[in-house]
Image: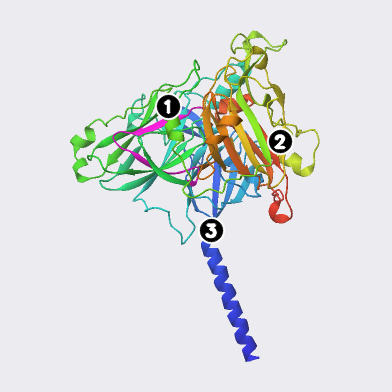
Amino acid sequence: MEIFKTFSFICLGVFIVICSALSASADVHRHKFVIEAAKVKRLCKTHNTITVNGMFPGPTLEINNGDTLEVLVVNKAKYNVTIHWHGVRQMRSGWADGPEFVTQCPIRPGRSYTYRFTVQGQEGTLWWHAHSSWLRATVYGALIIRPRYGESYPLPKPKRETPILLGEWWDANPIDVVREATRTGAAPNVSDAYTINGQPGDLYKCSSKETTIVLIDSGETNLLRVINAALNQPLFFKVANHKFTVIGADASYTKPFTTSVLMLGPGQTTDVLIRGDQKPSRYYMAARAYQSAQNAPFGNTTTTAILEYKSASCNTKKCKAANPIMPSLPAYNDTNTVTTFSQSFRSREKAEVPTDIDKSLFFTVGLGLNNCPVNFPKSRCQGPNGTRFTASMNNVSFVLPRNFSLLQAHQQGIPGVFTTDFPGTPPLKFDYTGNVSRSLFQPVPGTKLYKLKYGSRVQIVIQDTSIVTPENHPIHLHGYDFYIIAQGFGNFNPKKDTSKFNLVDPPLRNTVGVPVNGWAVIRFVADNPGVWLMHCHLDVHINWGLAMAFLVENGVGELQSIQPPPSDLPIC
C-alpha cells in the first residue's frame, strides 16, 4: 500500500511538472478593443475618427510564438466592423480571420465578438486592422511575435526596438471618401498625408510639434519593425545617412542583407536592424510613394519621423534646434530600386518548397472599366469616358455576399451564396502586358470560389495586365504563408521563366508585390481548411473586385478540419 501511495505521488508530481512546463511555455493574452469615435487632430483640423480604445494608431499587441490571443471587440462606432489579424495562419480557426462577409458577418454597432486564435510557428512582425469598408485607414496596430519561451532570436538581441507604422491620413471621413467613389464610379480622392506612427511629420502644416521621435545611442544596434498600413499606396522608406540590415519579413526570418532603402506594399512588414554608427545628431526617417501606375493620381508628399541620438553630445540646445538631415528618396516611379530590393529576399534556412504540384493555376490581375448602365445618370459614371472603374482576377470581379459569410455558407451547406467555378486559368489568353483590346475591359461580376483538396500542393502564376493601366499589385492571401519562387516582367513564359525558379531558399511571405507589367509565382500547401480570401491590398482595388477566395476542404479527422463556429459569431 505504501509503495502504491509513493508511486501515485510520483506520478502526480510528474503530471504537475509537465502541466507547469506546458503552461509556462504558452500564455493566453486577453485584450478588449472598443471601436469608438475619438477626436483626432491632424493637419490643423479635428475629426471624429474611428479608433480602438481612443488610440490612433491602435494598441501594439505583444505575444510569444505558441501563445493564444483572445480579443473582445466591442463596437461602439456607427459603422459595421471586423478585425483581421494580418498574416496569422489561423490554423483551423478561420472564424477568427476577420474579413467581412468572408469568414464572418460584421460586428454591428452595439454588438461584440471575441476573436480567439493561437499563433504557431511564426516569429517577427505582423499587424492587425479593420477589414470592413475603409475603416482600416485609422483602425490598425502592430502585432509583435517573439520567440517561444526559452528560445532566442537567431541573431544578437537588439538594444531596443520600435514599431514603425506607415499610414495614410485623409482630411475627411475615409468612409465618406469611399462611398462617394462608389456612387460616382470614379477613383477615390487620394489621401492628404502619409504618417509614421500616426503623425505626418515636419513637412506638413500644424504637424511638427507631434512628429514621431525614435531614440538611438552611439554604438547601439536597434530593431525597427516597419509596417505598411497605408490604405492604397506602396511606400519607400529611408533614414538619412544610415543603412538597414533586413532580417525578416511578414513574420519569417530572412538571410540578412544590407540596403539603404525599403519598399513595402500595403500589408507587408519588414524587420530591419539599424546601427548608431553616425555622428550623434538628428536624422529624418522619411517615407513617400512608389507610384507604378502611369497617369494615376497619387499623394506626392513625404512623411517624416526623427532618429535622435541620445548621446550627451546631442543634449545641447544647439543640437536639438538643428534641422534633421534629410535622406534622398528614390523617384516616385523607381521600379529598378523596387526590383533590386524585392529580389534580395531569401529564406534564412533551406526552404521546404512544394515540388510535385497538384494544382497549377494562372491568375491575371488588373483593373477594368464598366460601361455606364442605361438607368444611371452621368453623375454616377465619372470614370474615364463616362465609365465606372472595376477590377478583377481572371476576368471575374469579386462580389461579396450580404446575407451570409462565405465560411458560414460553406459550413452549413447554404445554397445560392457562392459557386465553386472560379477559373484556374484566364478564360481568354491575350497579350497581358501589351495593348489590350477595349472589349476585354469589362469583367464578369461573381462570387466564385476555387476549391482545393486538403494537402494540395499549389502553384499560382499571378500576372499583371495593362488593362486601363499596369500597376504593382500587393496580393495578400489569408490563412497562408507562401514561397515567392520567382518574379519577372512581361508575360510569364513557362518555357523560359521556370529556369528562374528558386526552389532552395525563396522568401516566405503573406503578401507579394506583383511587378508592374510583370508576374510573380508563389507556392504553398493547402493544409488549412476553410474559406480564404486572396486580394489586392490596395483597398481601392478590393472595393472594385480585385479578389477571389479559396475553399480548402477538410482533410481526415479533427486535426485536419476547421473548428466549429464560436457561439458568439455575429449573425447577418
Nearer-N-terminus badge (3/2): 3
Tag of residue 336? 1
Say which residue appears at 43% left-offset and 28% top-offset: 194
Say which residue appears at 36% left-offset and 33% top-offset: 238
Marks 3 and 1, Cα distance to the nearest angstrom?
44 Å
Tag of residue 27? 3
* Residue 511, x across and y down, in percent: 54, 37
User: Is residue 485 shown above or below 380?
Assistant: below
Q: Extreme bottom residue here?
A: 1
User: Residue tagged by mark 2?
Assistant: 450
Q: Amino acid at mark 1?
A: Asn
The answer, for residue 101, to whether it is visible in the render is no
Along the viewing direction, whichever of 112 and 507 lies nearer the viewer: 507
Marks 1 and 2, Cα distance to the nearest angstrom?
34 Å
Label 1 with label 2: CB-CB less than 8 Å:
no
Along the viewing direction, whichever of 381 and 198 lies nearer the viewer: 381
Left or right: where 226 falls relative to 509 = left
Q: Nearer the viewer, mark 3 or mark 1?
A: 1
Say which residue appears at 47% left-offset and 55% top-offset: 147
User: Is residue 415 shown above or below 72?
Assistant: above
Q: Amino acid at mark 2?
A: Tyr
**Total numbered badges shown on the rendered structure:** 3
Region in magenta: 232-252
